Amino acid sequence: MEFINIAGIALGLAMDAFAVAIASSITLRSVSPRQVFRLAFHFGLFQAMMPVLGWLAGKSVADVFGKWDHWVAFGLLAFIGIRAIHAALTDNPEEDVPDPTRGISLVMLSVATSIDALAVGLSFAMLHVRIWYPALVIGIVAATMTTLGMLLGTRLGSRFGRNTEIAGGLILIIIGLNILIQHLRE
């Protein structure tokens, strides 16, 4: 498979990670280099691992998982989005804003943004494409787009305040709905 095709697939897969990174950094208001690294590293790692898992799983497991993957992604993104909106609407300065770059939120976002990569791995197996190079490119592109999304989201969040936090939560829910609708149409 040519690099341009792999790069296009990687960029397409990274768009969810980019949008979620923007929304996540908006809810944080300001991000540290450590938070940017954590989110970029995990999104890149999960985006790289999922095609490998799809490639290894083969057709039988992917058919079963394919019936539920869109519901899982929607549920995870909606949950995180609702938490972000709740935090923005709760005007309690003593309450910390939940950090989406830590703990279970980080894992849930990483899984939700990389589920589509599992199907890509399956298709690579059917096409007899070696998975290691594409997985590496997919991971690097996802990490890069996540970093760019975090930096952009921080600027938006500091400029527009609490309204962008609500918008960030809504964006996560909309991304989840979009994934759900796209898969239900197929």
Image (tube, rainbow, N blue to C red):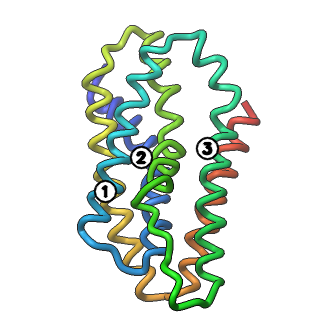
Q: Which residue is mark 1?
A: 38
Q: Secondary structure at mark 1?
A: helix
Q: Position of residue 13 (x, y in %)?
A: 45, 41
Q: Position of residue 154 (x, y in %)?
A: 38, 76
Q: Which residue is mark 3?
A: 73
Task: Decide: is 27 above or below 63.
Answer: below
Measure how far apart labels 2 and 1 are at the Cα level: 16 Å
Determine whether label 3 and label 1 are within 8 Å by CB: no
Return the mark for residue 90. none
Q: Quadrant of residue 85?
A: bottom right
Q: Which residue is mark 2?
A: 14
Q: Name the residue at 50% across, 70% down.
A: 98
Judge from the rendering whether residue 161 lies leftward or rightward of residue 183; answer left or right.
left
Measure how far apart labels 3 and 1 are at the Cα level: 20 Å
Q: Position of residue 43 (x, y in %)?
A: 38, 47
Judge from the rendering whether residue 172 lies leftward or rightward of residue 123; answer left or right.
right
Disc nearer the start of the sequence (2/3): 2
Task: Decide: is 44 above or below 151.
Answer: above
Q: Amino acid at mark 2?
A: Ala
Which of pointers 2 and 3 indicates the residue nearer the eye? 3
Q: Amino acid at mark 3?
A: Ala
Give 91 or 117, whichever is nearer the viewer: 91
